[in-house]
Image (cartoon, helix red, strand yellow):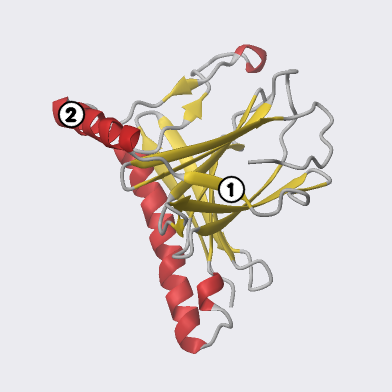
Amino acid sequence: MIYGHNSNVKVAANTFHVQTEDRGAAHSLIDTTVYFQGRVLHRRTNNYFDLLPLNEDRAQALKMRLDEQHAMVMEEIRSGALQLSVPPANAPAAAKTAATLPATSGAAAAAGGTAAQAGAAKRKLEVEILNPKAWLSGKHVTLQIQVRENNQGVDKAKVRVEIEGSAEATDFSGETAPNGKTQIEFDMPRLGGVDAAMVIRAEAHQAQGQLRFALRAKPRVPAIGG
């Protein structure tokens, strides 16, 4: 059985549609997409390789994991922890620019952020693409990513992929399994400039890492070095 949820989340005057679905055992992915007026603002993908092959008990565990991911994204939208870029109200389509919803504010949040940044500066995560020659097929991107620290896989690292210089807002994310691996899939957006780049950021336990490389306007399948 393939599970899924569709929910609306209202923040101030904005209503976001959150869709979470199981992509099936063939893909082994839980995919959550956040829409605003039909536009994709955020996508979060996590694998469930550890639950395969599915049986009755593991299917229940999959459903619980899917429910938790759906609820987590909605709560992050409500609290402001997930920042979403939305067009200004009543602006013409051609003139719309990105406006970011503020994250949770306050002295405590500011102090926590400062402490987290200080801790992150002391430790660095290693971000690696495991399929450097086969990550792009046509316009579809399949990134097999591993996050390490001191040559050990990092569990529950938050991984985000952003396409800089794209013609539309992009924000794709996932979370690593205990072996430090995750898979993130999306369709490559139309590139809007010669300086387009793909940036992969990882964060876990107050440590951060980043991998960045340039993209071509008409992308081929490049070999990516460390």
Q: Residue furthest top?
A: 95
Q: CA distance from mark 1 to mark 2?
A: 31 Å
Residue 200 position, x and y percent, is 56, 39
**Amino acid under label 1?**
Glu
Left or right? Give the position of 86 relative to 119. right
The residue drawn where x is 43% and y is 24% is 100
Quadrant hosting residue 211: top right
* Residue that extends furthest to the left in the rendered view of this protein: 107
Residue 97 at what x, y percent from top left?
56, 16
Q: Which badge, 1 or 2, comes first in the chain's sequence? A: 2
From this viewpoint, which residue is outermost toward the front? 150
Q: Is residue 169 above or below residue 29?
A: above
Residue 177 visible within the image: yes
Q: Nearer the viewer, mark 1 or mark 2?
A: 1
Query: On the picture, is 118 further left or further right than 15?
Result: left
| Residue 80 seen from this side | no
**Residue placed under numbered mark 1 in the picture:** 128
Q: Give the residue displayed 48% in from the left and 57% down from the top.
A: 176
Q: Residue 111's mark?
A: 2
Q: Which mark is residue 92?
A: none
- Report helix, strand or loop for mark 1: strand
Q: Position of residue 118 (x, y in %)?
A: 26, 31
